[in-house]
Image (spheres, coloured by chain):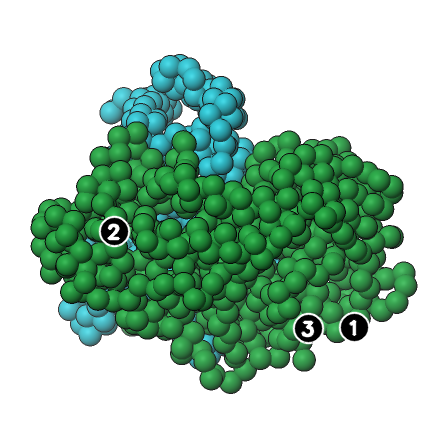
Chain colours: A cyan, B green
Amino acid sequence: MIRFIIKRLLLGLFVLAGVSVITFTVARVVPSDPAARWVGPRANAEQIAAARIELGLDKPLPQQYITYMKGLFTGDWGTSIRTHQPVLRELLSFLPSSLELILAGMLIAVVIGIPLGVISAVKKDSWIDQLTRTFSVGGVSIPTFWLGLILQLVFFRQLSLFPLGERVSTNTSLLYPIDNWTGFYLLDSLLQGNFDFFKDAALHLVLPALTMAAYPLGLVIRMIRSSMIDVLGEEHIRVLKAYGIPAWRRVFVYGLKNALGPTATSLGLTFAYALTSTFLIEAVFSWPGLGMYASQAILANDYPVTMAITFLVTVTYILINLLVDVVVAMLDPRIKLYQNA
Amino acid sequence: MMKKRSRNTLLLLMLSVMLVLSACGSKGNTTAANTGSNTGSNTGSNTSSGNAPKGGIAVYSVNSDVMTFWDPSDSFSNEIIAMHNMYETLLRYNAQTKTFDKVLAEDYSKSADGLTWTFKLRKGIKFHTGAELSADLVKKSIERTIKRGKGASYIWESVKEINVVDQYTVEFKLKYAEALDNVVSAGYSAFIFDADALDKNGEDWINEGHDVGSGPYTVQKWTKGSDLVLTSYPEYWKGWTPKNFEKVVFKTTPEANTRQQQLEAGEVDITNQLTPEMLKSLDGKPGVQVLKTEAFQNLTLQMNTLKAPFNNPKARQALAYALNYDSIVKDIMGGMAEQSTGYLPKGLWGQDSSLFKYSYNPDKAKELLKEAGVSGGKLSITYLSGDEAERQVAELLKVELAKVGLDLEIKGMTWDAQWDLAKSPDASQRQDLFLLYYWSGYSDPYGYLSIAYKTENPIVYNLGYYSNPKFDSLIDQARKSAGSNRDGATALYKQAQEILINDAPGISIFDLKYGYALRDNFKGFSSNPYYANVVFFYDTYRE
């Protein structure tokens, strides 16, 4: 297992190197002068030249790349051309809010999706299966942007059940402020015993998290359903029945365990993808997350930020893939990781 | 039996999830309620003398991040929306009276030649740092801004030197007789601040979300990408009344639909940048008021004067006749615009409504193109992708040009990309037509006319690459005499615009109007086109 992990991590380094070279080159060959952007439109040629030296853009491209990569591993992720702020600091201020949203969405997807998928499989072709399948197709195909607006209309406008957007209401953040420990509002407020803040932040999370959950929810239902149908038809499950193992145990312990593997894999990929693809949800719910930050950076040709986000997403992909493989191996004793190594 | 139990377990699980969700929901009412006045306990500020503000919290929902650059010398963007509540200038333009209100300056005078301006400062004004306003700090603020050379610091170009006459008197010596009242009241880079404290604390400190101004409000809390909370400064020199707002919140709400819902639900007092359709649907709704105001911004069609066919003035005039202005204003802009007269926005001094106005005349356009020898070919136009109005204007133009055999290729691009294209070293590579909005760092006719049409090298914003020494000298002359003879300057600006109308290097299509939607109990707000999107919250209150 350890050998497998080390091997995968080393492989990950190669992927990272490849991705960083490509992004760096693409970001730098586009016809746009970061130095000119840095000093603003009214700057004269000397100011631009000075900025070029200040930003290290006067050096040859390979050298810039090496400097950049060195910085990446020593905590200097460069400075944003658009905001003139250290990229790492900005990234870390937006990352927790995105993660909080994505994790909440994933949690909803798993908690609702797995039972629904199982029911669907067990009651194959019944009315409940038809309904669930419609629901899951809707989940994966509905535009999240539109879903967010509809949820706002129904739950905010008509029913006044949930707030319209933002992570927490201004009143709460002024009356019951919390210290920023991890940047996860729910976690921070819990750790600090600030339940007023917690309650408010949790309420604010519901609609964006439901919107976020739509796609993975549909995915989980479909994956679980189809794997469960396969698994339940297999001989070992029938043997269990013959042994008199109760139905719920057959389905939820023996069956589900076999069906979780593929679901975990695709869920892991969805997670990494969600890091930056959530910007539409973030826009609708005024959620200050990584997606918004990334889209602003791309529009402004802010290459240090684009680089950093690409880097972050790549690392997440690599780590999550690894994690998923390890988890799947633990779920399924038939998979032996060390044999691959 | 077994089967039934498993189903029950599942149902129970699902039910409990739904219950948890709805339980959370039922308490949601408290947050959805108005961000009213129940935060008094947290003000933590008590005026030592006079009244305290007890008006609660005002909320302004803005389409993008309000704060990026916190340095009052450098800021040249959205930041002014909040900064004009934290910082003050010597004078402020009054859009109603069309004169300058005295803010930090108690009085001011200029010499007969317009080369020396003297400002008397109010006494006893305190910055949020505790320092007192003095001539020395005025000098330091402006000199710092000039020295940094960022933002709109170029507005101070005419200033030769700044002298401290005494503690409360500051004198400006100018290189030429510019209208300095225009400059010291500018929206950007004209703030007076505690320059000592700023330099002592450094750039990182200010960018964490601090201010060193003298305005009515000071920073309480800034959550990047989310909101900025300002709180009343107890020792503000104009004093406080119970009607004043205690706090002001600027919320970043990128999505227009969300801003509209916030306003309808009474969660915010005011918002901007809604589409004409949204404003129409909001108009007349209970509790909501829609304001249509002048904005010193015009949509301009710049033509590449270095390249055929638009190196020929006749072809450019033809285009001016090919635009259906009424349809653009009415159908595309939904009335949120007005056809421009000349090249200065309506409401700015120097604007002259007697100037010649092009009108839609396709026959005349055809005739002029024929005279120019243009019979066919391919042209390109760029606009800011995502800007619906610009796209539709481009589409309209495409239809008109197709009638005379010209094929217009429409390209929506990001601002940087189209701007870089317009600055390509080889003029033939640049777009033929460029649709963009113009506004100026400070609201002076010179600012508007020079930014887009004065000879420029290297190219910055003169994106039709127009160069006419006569025009240049007229506006220079006007600028240099406006301080001593404004009527003379106005006449010169008129003359300069006549040249532009005839030469048509670009067309000012329309003057934009800003639409604000506000709660009808939010009072005291009047839009001031000098300060785009700024709400001076000290003047506002809730009924």
* Residue B541 visible in the current orientation: yes
B305 sits left or right of A108 in the view: left
Inspect the image, locate mark 3, and give the three-letter code of the amino acid beneath it. Answer: Tyr
Q: Chain of mark 1?
A: B
Q: Residue B541 bears which disc, if any?
A: 3
Q: Is residue A196 above or below residue B376?
A: below
Residue B284 image offset from top left, x and y in percent: 47, 84
Label 1 sits on a secondary structure element that is: loop
Q: Chain of mark 3?
A: B
Label 2 sits on a secondary structure element that is: helix
Residue B508 image offset from top left, x and y in percent: 37, 57
Name the residue: 58% across, 79% down. B520
Q: Is residue B413 above or below residue B145?
A: below
Residue B164 image-quadrant placement: top right
Dot placed on the residue nearer the N-terminal end, 2 or 1:
1
Label 3 sits on a secondary structure element that is: strand
Dot placed on the residue nearer the N-terminal end, 3 or 2:
2
User: Residues at badges 2 and 1 in contact (C-beta under 8 Å)?
Assistant: no
Q: Chain of mark 2?
A: B
Q: Residue B242 bears which disc, if any?
A: 1
Q: State the residue position of label 2.
A: B316
Residue B320 image-quadrant placement: bottom left
Name the residue: 83% across, 45% down. B169
Separation (CA) of disc 2 from disc 1: 58 Å
Dot placed on the residue nearer the N-terminal end, 1 or 3:
1
User: Residues at badges 3 and 2 in contact (C-beta under 8 Å)?
Assistant: no
Separation (CA) of disc 3 from disc 2: 50 Å
Inspect the image, locate mark 1, and give the three-letter code of the amino acid beneath it. Answer: Pro
B279 sits left or right of B502 in the view: right
Name the residue: 42% across, 15% down. A59
